Amino acid sequence: MPKFIIAYHGGAKPATQEEGMAHMQKWKSWIAGLGDDVINPGTPLGKSKTISADGVKDAQNGMNGYMIVKADDLEAAIKIAKSDPFLQMKNASVEVAQIVEMG
């Protein structure tokens, strides 16, 4: 079954500790509901930089985390991503891409 990365962008931090705990509980329940389709339930990332031939600069809307899931196809992976509680946060978005196995 194909694997997909769901990359997290943005998302305002919870205003209170209670709000953060409530969001974390929603996320844990969501992950549990996905069952065996979850390969990596989530990996937070620190600040990122964009490197090019022109130099190094702060990333525009850098990726702040990712998870990896199994799904039948891109549409199924998008359905999983759309149900992610992360999207309930202000200024949050996710990006979905199939992981292409090399050789």
Image: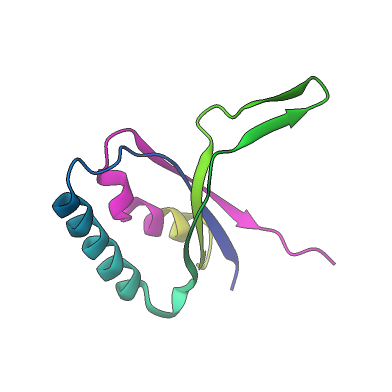
The reply, left or right, for residue 89 in relation to residue 52 is left
User: Compared with residue 15, is residue 33 higher up or lower down, i.e. above or below?
Assistant: below
The quadrant the C terminus occupies is bottom right
* Residue under the image location 19 percent in, 40 percent down: 15
The reply, left or right, for residue 86 in relation to residue 96 is left
Magenta segment includes 76:
no
* Residue under the image location 46 percent in, 74 percent down: 37
User: Compared with residue 84, is residue 71 higher up or lower down, i.e. above or below?
Assistant: below
User: Compared with residue 34, is residue 74 higher up or lower down, i.e. above or below?
Assistant: above
Span colored in magenta: 79-103
User: Which residue lies most toward the top here?
Assistant: 54
User: Which residue lies most toward the front here?
Assistant: 17
Magenta segment includes 81:
yes
Q: Residue 54 location in percent, x, y?
A: 80, 19
* Residue under the image location 53 percent in, 36 percent down: 62
Front-lying residue, 76 or 65: 65
The reply, left or right, for residue 47 in relation to residue 92 is right
